Image (tube, grey):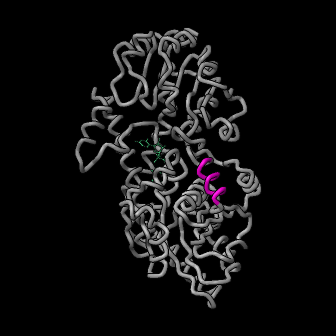
Amino acid sequence: MRITIVGGGYVGLVSGACFAALGAVVTIVEVDQGRFTALREGRMPIYEPGLEALVATSRTAGRLAFADSIEEVADTDMVFLAVGTPSRRGDGHADLTYVFEAAEQVAAALTKPVVLVTKSTVPVGTGRRLAELMALRRPDLAVSVASNPEFLREGCAIDDFMQPDRIVIGSDSATATAMLCELYAPLTVKGARLLATGLETAEMIKYAANSFLAMKIAFINEMADMCEKLGAEIGDIATGLGLDHRIGPQFLQAGPGFGGSCFPKDTQAMVRIAQDAGAPSRLVETVVAVNEARKAAMSSRIIAACGGVVRGKRIAILGLTFKPDTDDIRDSPALGIIHRLVDEGAMVSAYDPMGCNHARFQLPSRVNFCEDSQQALQGADALIIVTEWNEFKMLDPVAIHQAMRGHVVVDLRNIFHGPTMRAAGLVYYGIGSAPSPLDVRAEAETQRLSYAG
Ligand code: UDX
């Protein structure tokens, strides 16, 4: 089967490479010349474990090619739209500009009937609008439309594609559904569940899934705040919740708030979709509000841990990406935290195994980007863990204490063991547990020293 993927980003590039690995002949269209050139030269424009090798194998097998214009879709059976659907400035609606631009170009280039598939996350009803557009532009061709949302997590996208919990196909066209079932047959024959629904249902499953996962995170983060006041431990709370098979242990890790290119934009879009439909979702509205407030609260928490004043203090930030195993910093909690600390006069040294290059463009020039953790820690008054990269978990508490000038550690991902950190002489603050009496006394001392100037 010959398919064309429009958009060679996190979704299109991974999906295209995986479809090729499943046996389809794939052309990925990437109109951004920088990305297109990189892809043609075998360089990945995004970081995703295993992607470079998968792309190379499929290209060598002659099942994966890249193009920089949509004219290439002339001889294809299916066209997947995997272009960006960012949040529209100001109102949070999904911006479908790229989706409809691509659809217009596809309509103009077609020479035979195709199935047009939305892989990008698009508001409920978009597929219907695309079907109307195609009927208007190409009444001469039978173009059927389907929704095939992706459920890929950055950092493990290939595994998520190859071992899906479910494949969702939404369409009113039996032809489209049958062709997509054939495309995914190598996975379904191995037991992957395939759910065939109507168009709007498939579009809604995607938003409902991301909204629910985001809600789970917002919930555990609120429980973490309660733990700090009540003397409970959020890690044990998460375990206790997760052992209930109706809840499950996933997505109960308290942190600084969710980021990334999906949860923030998809929850905001869900809020708008629900409002426009006349069925507002107060739950998802609250998830958005709780998460935004939490990200801002993290900066205040850091400043409080530093005695209420960070002006002139050296603060080491470990972690810039929104999660580990990616180079993606979109909506990362680290961005707001660093802007606030710099605004308050702190001198920030930042390190991330993959995120520094992207982060440079979104952070003040005064931020000192370091080559490794040690360089960031050297002479720091405080250490802040924002992203739970494995290499940060390996840091030795005694070595941390020796490298730093001050002793405050704020661990927003609970990667360290509090008592071990305190035994090394550090004033350790995790999240979701009551501050140790030791810290309370140390904090008072820090405040006395900083006010003493
Ligand atoms: C998400 C969905 O998981 C995926 O199914 C969808 O297709 C795209 O959006 P992604 O954004 O890549 O995937 O990353 P994910 O692992 O879901 O993490 C999203 C955010 O939630 C990150 O900022 C992460 O730090 C945070 N998170 C996740 C938590 O704070 N706690 C958790 O327990 C899990």
Q: Residue at x 72, y 32 (%)?
A: 365
Residue 235 or 5: which is nearer the viewer?
5
* Furthest residue in direction bottom, as rendered: 140
What's drawn in magenta, residue-wise? 53-61
Which is nearer the eye, 144 or 333? Answer: 144
Give the dominant element type of the magenta stretch: helix, strand or loop. Answer: helix
Q: Quadrant of the C terminus?
A: top right
Identify the image quadrant of residue 65. Answer: bottom right
- In the image, residue 100 above or below residue 35: below
Residue 99's place in the image compared with 263, above or below, is: below
Compared across the picture, whether 294 is left or right of 134 comes to left
Up the image or down, 88 lies above or below 330; here it is: below
Residue furthest front as drawn:
61
User: Residue at the location (59% across, 76% down)?
Assistant: 77
| Point 28% across, 35% down: residue | 237
For residue 7: magenta? no
> Residue 379, percent across and down?
61, 13
Where's residue 79, x and y in %? 59, 72
365 in relation to 107, above or below? above
Quadrant of the snapshot with the N terminus? bottom right
Q: Is residue 244 visible?
A: yes
Residue 60 lies in the magenta stretch = yes
Percent position (x, y) of residue 354? 61, 36
- The residue sitting at 48% across, 22% down in the picture is 394
